[in-house]
């Protein structure tokens, strides 16, 4: 059944670069998003211009709410679900050792991991994160729980078990042998990659190869992972890791990596050049389905190589402030041509909301010294948290904005749930210049959205709602199940039936009764 969603639409249309985002910004105050029965966008425009063929469609009126593309989190840690803003670790390497490895080790308990998977999905739904690159747990049962609960929720995910073959004493429960590192990763790919549809181009579930970082593996691991990736690259498998996060002299992550591998650049360890002197020792892990988190302290040659290979950066300023990792130079990084998406890096930091990451990006980059300071345009912020994320996941053709033909991933922002957002939207000064007023309102949204503002979340046109904790064995997708089963008998209220007509809960409970 075709549905019409009404609200103030903002999105970055087409396929621009970040520097082109401002000119690609679309704002439609009296907007309509029309979604067909397959969950694809068939119209995005003025409410008054809805084509006649859709005039009989069911209307869901979110006014005076806003419709934004679903947020994409390009870097977040599932086994750190309970480790947000951990105190007592200091900067990166000590924080991993003292706070994170012990916390992640708790996922060895399968019941614990199951509860965490439910919690993790629900935190994502609350934050409107419709797609994510998720750094996984090394324990296969924990990854099974994550994929199972994610499929049940209807969210998109790319994830892979965190691979570690060397580490300090606190990391011991997370380590595997060299052979198990490859075997378990291969098994996860075979079990979960496109497991929901059997087709990588239509799947919501995808798998990544995820070495924690170069210091957590060996040259043997990197060689074996290169061969593994080479054998599954054409199946659309991903790669995810960390790069150039902490540059504390001598004892920080960047120097420790260069010392351990005797390479010219940190990136070389992921690019097959992990032997002393950056000699080639294996195959590259870089490419258009590779995302490297942080990349704060890159050499120009590293940025150029990432841009050349289509590798993306997950930019995580909330985390970088929390762990004292410094500020990624925005102008230089963007000028290199590398795609920059946004990542929460939860729990290095305390936010699940990508808009909070965008807000911190604005603050840290306007605070860069001298001529490096930049006032990010609100369209650049929105782009980084949506379309750039879809690009980083190599799924820009499927979602990331409201271009006709794309799968309808979106969030409904209802300011009435957040007084601190509602007030400046209602009473803030707006320019007499229409374009600037448009940008000011978007900026207010991106700075002011909180979980309380995310009223509804949709993936492929179907609403996703919080999972109940009680059972892990329900139907995989309440809404799509209903869509197939009910022939639309359970229609949401039509326009005029109240703002934010809510098709979620009744459809969901109905769906559960259908499948249960
Ligand atoms: Zn991280």
Image: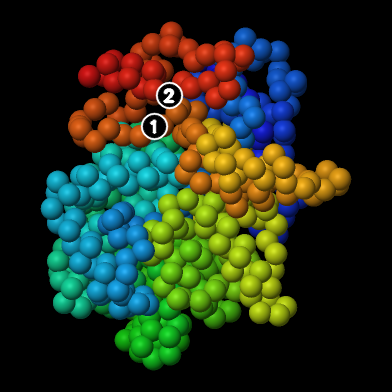
Q: Would the CB of label 2 be found within 8 Å of ligand 1?
A: no
* Nearer the observer, 285 or 59: 59
Whole-Å distance between the Cαs marked 1 and 2? 7 Å
User: Residue at image x 38%, y 49%?
Assistant: 158
Dot 1 surroundings within 10 Å: few (below 14), some, or many (20 or more)?
Answer: many
Rendering coords of residue 63 (x, y %)? 63, 27
Q: Secondary structure at mark 1?
A: loop
Q: Quadrant of residue 275?
A: bottom left
Q: Is residue 227 visible?
A: no
Apparent side of residue 298 relative to residue 370 in the rendered image (left or right): left
In this figure, which residue is indicated by the disc labeled 1? 465
Res. 497 image quadrant: top right
Q: Is residue 36 left or right of residue 168?
A: right
**Sequence-first disc among 1 and 2:** 1
Q: Is residue 289 above or below residue 244?
A: above
Residue 277 % position (x, y): 40, 89
Residue 452 rendering spot, x and y as whole percentages? 48, 41
Please tell me whether residue 253 is drawn above or below residue 307 in the rendered image.
below
Within 10 Å of disc 2 (Cα), the crowding (few <14, some 14-19, many 20+) is: some
The quadrant in which the C terminus is found is top left
Q: Regarding mark 2 in the picture, which secondary structure is present there?
A: helix
Asked if the residue at tag 2 contacts the one at tag 1, i.e. Cβ–Cβ closer than 8 Å, the answer is yes
Query: In the rendering, which numbered label is found on residue 504?
Result: 2
- Most foreground residue, 12 or 85: 85
Expressed as whole percent of the image width and height from the top left, the position of residue 418 reads 54, 41
Residue 90 can be seen, yes or no: yes
């Amino acid at each position: 059944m075709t549905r019409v969603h009404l609200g103030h639409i903002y999105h970055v249309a087409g396929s621009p670069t970040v520097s082109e985002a401002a000119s690609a910004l679309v704002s439609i105050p009296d907007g309509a998003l029309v979604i067909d029965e397959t969950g694809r966008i068939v119209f995005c425009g003025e409410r008054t211009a809805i084509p006649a063929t859709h005039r009989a469609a069911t209307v869901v009126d979110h006014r005076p709410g806003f419709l934004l593309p679903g947020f994409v989190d390009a870097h977040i840690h599932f086994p750190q679900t309970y480790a947000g803003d951990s105190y007592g670790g200091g900067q990166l390497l000590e924080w991993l050792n003292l706070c994170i490895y012990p916390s992640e080790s708790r996922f060895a308990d399968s019941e614990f991991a199951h509860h965490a998977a439910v919690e993790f999905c629900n935190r994502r739904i609350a934050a409107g994160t419709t797609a994510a690159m998720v750094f996984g747990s090394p324990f296969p049962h924990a990854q099974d729980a994550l994929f199972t609960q994610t499929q049940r929720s209807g969210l998109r995910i790319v994830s892979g078990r965190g691979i570690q073959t060397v580490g300090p004493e606190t990391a011991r429960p997370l380590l595997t042998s060299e052979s198990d590192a490859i075997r378990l990763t291969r098994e996860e790919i075979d079990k979960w990659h496109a497991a929901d549809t059997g087709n990588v181009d239509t799947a919501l579930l995808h798998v990544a190869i995820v070495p924690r970082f170069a210091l957590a593996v060996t040259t043997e691991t990197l060689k074996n992972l290169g061969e593994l990736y080479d054998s599954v690259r054409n199946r659309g498998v991903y790669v995810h890791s960390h790069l150039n996060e902490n540059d504390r002299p001598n004892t920080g992550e960047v120097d420790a990596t260069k010392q351990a591998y005797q390479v010219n650049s940190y990136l070389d360890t992921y690019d097959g050049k992990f032997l002393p002197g950056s000699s080639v020792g294996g195959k590259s892990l870089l490419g258009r389905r590779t995302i490297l988190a942080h990349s704060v302290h890159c050499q120009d040659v590293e940025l150029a190589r990432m841009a050349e290979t289509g590798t993306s950066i997950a930019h995580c300023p909330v985390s970088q402030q929390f762990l004292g990792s410094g500020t990624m130079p925005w102008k230089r990084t963007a000028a290199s041509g590398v795609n920059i998406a946004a990542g929460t890096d939860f729990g290095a930091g305390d936010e699940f909301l990508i808009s909070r990451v965008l807000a911190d990006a604005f603050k840290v980059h306007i605070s860069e010294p001298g001529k490096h300071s930049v006032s990010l345009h609100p369209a650049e912020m929105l782009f980084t948290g949506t379309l750039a994320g879809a690009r980083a996941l190599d799924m820009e053709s499927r979602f990331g904005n409201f271009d006709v033909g794309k799968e309808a991933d979106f969030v409904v922002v209802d300011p009435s749930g957040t007084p601190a957002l509602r007030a400046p939207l209602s009473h803030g000064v707006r320019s007499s210049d229409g374009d600037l007023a448009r940008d000011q309102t978007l900026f207010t949204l991106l700075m002011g959205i909180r979980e309380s503002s995310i009223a509804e979340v949709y993936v492929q046109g179907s609403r996703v709602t919080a999972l109940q904790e009680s059972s892990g064995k329900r139907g995989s997708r309440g809404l799509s199940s209903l869509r197939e089963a009910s022939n639309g008998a359970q229609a949401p209220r039509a326009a005029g039936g109240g703002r934010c007509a809510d098709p979620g809960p009744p459809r969901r409970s109905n769906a559960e009764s259908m499948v249960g």
